[in-house]
Image: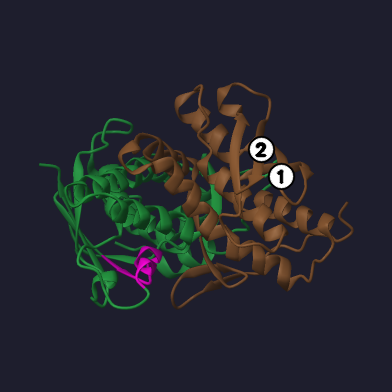
């Protein structure tokens, strides 16, 4: 496996991102937006803290599902885009599923979602992702919370595994699932995300 | 009208944390899938008044950003302040926004292009009711910031929507 992660992050983080004359940012086969992280964090935090105790987990799952579906479609858009072919593909030796996964998490990092890397990978079976400095941890500014809150990383990590090992797009969504086992927002040094086949 | 050319927010990518900031605030790239899925989630989450939560989330996130933008650039003329919040909307990819009228207690704005509406149509097609809760929150924040008021100073209602087939979306704001 050879993926020049550092170079991918360097290249992809430098892409000029600003709305065109119409205020739109078409790229990677999608419309991109560049918003304060607080827009997403506020909604997730307000939602899970506004519902009764019995609805907390369902609310969390709705947030994870939104990210999961987004990660599946956007992830596919990314790895089939001209930007990927020009900026990422030349930085890996072969486009194996494992290399594509490592490349996808490098792009994930470059987009500012969190400094993520794959710590363990059993092809088709299991992936463990570690994340530092991810924006979803910003919901806690002091102290810690009992339940991890990185819903976006959970959903997107499962989606990336599906794109690497699931049935061909668009038939692979929801074939993997992810649980967050550690979180900066919970007082841990980093976030940890374990992806396995959906039960 | 604006006499001052809009200066883009200062972008910085921190190589250590791999975070992007715009004028010092953490910013992230997402796409229309994520934005519309959040809007759909908010629309479905009636048990928590999800639509209001997403409007409020956007307003609370944008208000300090826009207030800082106006302060840092020293914009004191009303026309310049309005132009700056219109331009910021365009800069961050949310669409093309234009105020038709703005006064101390009310405002009307048009969105001629809309990331959320066009993203929704791309993903699911048209629908009758508005979905741009992020845009509504942005406008509430923008109008308050232009007037140097606190968040929640204006209530914004979307009266026409691109997602419902209108040529542009129209928003009516009144002082809360």
Name which of mark 1 and mark 2 comes first in the sequence.
1
Quadrant in the picture for residue A34: bottom right
Q: Is residue A26 visible?
A: no
Q: Tell me, what hue is chain B?
A: brown
- Residue sitting at x 49%, y 45%: B31
Given residues B10 and B46, the one toward you in this image is B46
The CA span between labels 1 and 2 is 7 Å
- Residue B106: numbered disc: 1
Q: Is residue B36 above or below residue B28?
A: above
Local secondary structure at mark 1: strand
Locate residue B157, reporting x and y percent. Answer: 59, 37
**Residue B8 falls left or right of residue B60:** right
Q: Is residue B52 above or below residue A112?
A: above
- Residue sitting at x 69%, y 42%: B96
Given residues A82 and A58, the one toward you in this image is A58
- What is the residue that sits farthest to the left in this orientation? A199
Q: Are marks 1 and 2 in contact (CB under 8 Å)?
A: yes
Quarter in which the N terminus of chain A is drawn: bottom left
- Residue sitting at x 68%, y 30%: B168
Q: Which chain is green?
A: A
Given residues A66 and A2, the one toward you in this image is A66
**Residue A96 falls left or right of residue A21:** left
**Residue beneath disc 2:** B172
**Residue B31 falls left or right of residue A73:** right
Classify 10 Å Cα crowding around label 1: few (below 14), some (14-19), many (20 and above): some
Locate residue A121, reporting x and y percent. Answer: 19, 59
């Amino acid at each position: 496996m050879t993926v020049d992660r550092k170079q991918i992050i360097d290249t992809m983080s430098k892409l000029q991102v600003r709305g065109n004359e119409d205020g739109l940012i078409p790229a990677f086969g999608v419309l991109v937006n560049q918003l304060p992280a607080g827009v997403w964090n506020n909604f997730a935090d307000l939602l899970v803290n506004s519902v009764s105790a019995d609805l907390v987990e369902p609310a969390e799952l709705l947030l994870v599902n939104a990210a999961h579906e987004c990660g599946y479609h956007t992830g596919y858009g990314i790895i089939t885009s001209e930007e990927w072919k020009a900026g990422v593909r030349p930085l890996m030796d072969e486009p194996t599923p494992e290399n594509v996964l490592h490349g996808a998490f490098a792009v994930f990092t470059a987009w500012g979602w969190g400094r993520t890397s794959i710590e363990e990978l059993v092809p088709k079976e299991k992936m463990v992702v570690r994340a530092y400095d991810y924006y979803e941890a910003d919901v806690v500014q002091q102290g810690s919370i009992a339940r991890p809150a990185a819903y976006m990383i959970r959903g997107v990590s499962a989606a990336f595994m599906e794109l690497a090992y699931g049935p061909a797009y668009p038939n692979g969504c929801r074939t993997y699932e992810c649980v967050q086992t550690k979180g900066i927002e919970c007082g841990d040094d980093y976030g940890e995300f374990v992806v396995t086949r959906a039960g | 009208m604006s006499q001052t050319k809009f200066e883009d927010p200062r972008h910085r990518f921190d190589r250590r944390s791999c975070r992007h900031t715009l004028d010092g605030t953490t910013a992230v790239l997402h796409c229309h899938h994520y934005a519309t899925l959040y809007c759909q989630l908010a629309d479905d989450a009636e048990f928590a008044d999800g639509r209001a939560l997403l409007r409020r989330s956007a307003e609370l996130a944008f208000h300090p950003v826009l207030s800082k933008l106006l302060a840092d650039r020293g914009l004191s003329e009303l026309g310049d302040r309005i132009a700056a919040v219109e331009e910021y909307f365009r800069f961050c990819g949310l669409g093309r926004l234009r105020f038709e009228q703005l006064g101390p207690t009310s405002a009307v704005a048009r969105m001629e292009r809309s990331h959320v509406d066009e993203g929704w149509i791309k993903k699911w097609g048209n629908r009758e009711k508005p979905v741009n809760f992020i845009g509504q929150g942005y406008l509430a924040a923008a109008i308050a910031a232009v007037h140097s008021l606190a968040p929640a100073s204006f209530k914004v209602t979307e009266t026409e929507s691109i997602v419902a087939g209108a040529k542009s979306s129209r928003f009516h704001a009144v002082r809360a």
